[in-house]
Image (cartoon, rainbow, N blue to C red):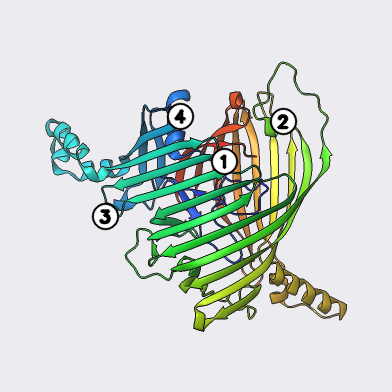
């Protein structure tokens, strides 16, 4: 899920997910038709830099995390980073992780530990030497020029993942109005819409994106190549992977237009001697925004195969052409988004000075929506009852978010998706992908926060830093 992108952000492209499953702590969203698109990124520090910030400025010597899917049955872990002193434009670090839950489990199973206290110390010492409890990540971030950065990471795991270390190389160049990103990951970690993680042996991409803007036109170009057979993370079974993860080359181009409008903006005077906890959350308002756009994909290889949606004779909902003789295909579709944001309070006072609600309606398959809307309108004009299939086509993907200040810089946040299935008579509306978070606003940085979040569905917990998010 887009855990820490939060539904309030304006760009329509999916961003990396935060996950404690690996040391690198991110997973790419599986490319669907038409979205997500390539290497879209949020304003996110690398995991070692986040850890260093916690150590130096927040008196947090060890950073906790939890994932039920970790190898060897582990779950709760602690992390610590060691920064190596180099030049100001070169950040080098070693990130270590200790699997606390597996350590405790192994110690309890030990007969020597159960027999008596005399041998417990030796038992604990013996298990602390087990290499399978540790993971180590190397990270190098080099500022080549003011516009160019190079990130290299290499993570090793001593448990089940010992034979499968993870490496990544990312080059970024900032143009005046664009960002160019080139990335190679082996293996690449992806997550699908059902929350399942997948490993792709080698994933490479080049992405060119216009800089995000509050309103106006934006566009995105991405060239993506997968190599090798994808495999579900931490699974020995034979699972059918998402088609877009299969080996092959794909090219995506997208364009969108965004507009914003304030329905109301408060004029409540701010406290003169009290600085707001977050400059982006300092004004009460009610606003709406809308995005429309289109995406076209050309795929060459096994990933050109696109499965049809169940009970949908029109396939993926857009225009689709497949050329079996050339093992290639072309797809195109429209997309749209509408959102509402309402905030009360200036986030300045000590108690309950911020209540924020955000709702978002996504229409990722615009042509299917237009087909359904046309059918419904025709049936109503002819005094006939529209079918459930027609109504289902116009149902959006719904996301809601609620944030409430508790005390000072601390606030509670909850985010959830709402799935509408009119064909399910027993339960047509379900709540999924709920995430709960405690945020601590770092007032001195203007708009930054330390976030501790938990996902009940994924059974994941993580503490991280976020910058310039609302």
Whether 446 is drawn above or below 95: the answer is above
Question: Which quadrant would residue 48 be assigned to in this image?
Answer: top left
462 and 34: which one is in front? 34
Q: Which mark is residue 163?
A: 3
Instruction: Please give the name of the residue rendered at 73% of the width and 29% of the height, measured from the top-left corner.
Output: 346
Residue positioned most to the bottom? 325
Badge 2 density bin: few <14, some 14–19, many ≥20, Cα 10 Å? some
- Earlier sequence position, callout 1 versus callout 2: 1
- Earlier sequence position, callout 4 versus callout 3: 4
Residue located beneath label 1 in the image: 43
Whether 136 is drawn above or below 393: the answer is above
Instruction: Please give the name of the residue rendered at 40% of the width and 44% of the height, measured from the top-left corner.
Output: 152
Badge 3 density bin: few <14, some 14–19, many ≥20, Cα 10 Å? few
What secondary structure is found at the residue carrying circle 1? loop
- Earlier sequence position, callout 4 versus callout 1: 1
Q: CA distance from mark 3 to mark 1?
A: 32 Å
């Amino acid at each position: 899920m887009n855990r820490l992108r939060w539904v309030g952000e304006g760009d329509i492209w999916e961003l990396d997910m935060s996950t404690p499953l690996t040391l690198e702590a991110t997973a790419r969203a599986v490319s669907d038709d038409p979205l997500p698109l390539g290497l879209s990124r949020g304003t996110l520090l690398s995991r070692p830099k986040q850890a260093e910030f916690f150590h130096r400025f927040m008196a947090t010597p060890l950073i906790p995390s939890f994932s039920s899917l970790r190898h060897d049955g582990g779950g709760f872990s602690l992390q610590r980073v060691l920064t190596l002193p180099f030049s100001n434009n070169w950040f080098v670090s070693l990130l270590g992780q200790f699997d606390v839950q597996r350590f405790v489990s192994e110690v309890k199973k030990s007969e020597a530990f159960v027999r008596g206290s005399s041998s417990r110390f030796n038992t604990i010492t013996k298990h602390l030497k087990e290499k399978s409890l540790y993971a180590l990540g190397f990270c190098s971030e080099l500022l080549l020029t003011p516009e160019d950065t190079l990130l290299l990471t290499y993570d090793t795991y001593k448990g089940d993942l010992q034979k499968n270390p993870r490496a990544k190389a990312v080059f970024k160049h900032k143009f005046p109005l664009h960002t160019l990103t080139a990335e190679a990951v082996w293996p690449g970690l992806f997550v699908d819409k059902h929350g399942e993680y997948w490993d792709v042996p080698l994933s490479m991409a080049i992405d060119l994106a216009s800089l995000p803007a509050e309103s106006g036109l934006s566009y995105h170009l991405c060239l993506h190549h997968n190599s090798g057979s994808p495999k579900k993370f931490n699974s020995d079974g034979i699972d059918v992977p998402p088609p877009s993860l299969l080996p092959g080359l794909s090219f995506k181009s997208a364009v969108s237009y965004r507009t914003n409008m304030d329905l109301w903006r408060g004029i409540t005077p701010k406290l003169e001697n009290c600085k707001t906890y977050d400059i982006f959350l300092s004004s009460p308002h009610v606003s709406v925004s809308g995005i429309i756009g289109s995406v076209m994909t050309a795929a060459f290889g096994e990933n050109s195969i696109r499965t049809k949606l169940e009970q949908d004779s029109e396939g993926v909902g857009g225009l689709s052409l497949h050329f079996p003789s050339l093992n290639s295909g072309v797809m195109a579709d429209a997309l749209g988004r509408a959102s509402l944001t309402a905030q009360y309070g200036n986030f300045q006072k000590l108690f309950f000075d911020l209540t924020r609600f955000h709702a978002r309606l996504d229409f990722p398959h615009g042509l299917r929506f237009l087909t359904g809307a046309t059918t419904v309108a025709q049936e109503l004009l002819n005094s006939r009852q529209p079918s459930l299939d027609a109504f289902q086509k116009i149902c959006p993907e719904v996301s809601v978010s609620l944030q409430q200040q508790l005390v000072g810089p601390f606030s509670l946040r909850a985010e959830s998706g709402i799935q509408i299935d009119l064909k399910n008579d027993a339960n047509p509306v379900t709540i999924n992908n709920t995430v709960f978070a405690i945020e601590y606003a770092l007032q001195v940085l203007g708009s930054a926060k330390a976030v501790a979040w938990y996902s009940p569905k994924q059974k994941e917990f993580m503490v991280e830093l976020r910058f310039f998010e609302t």
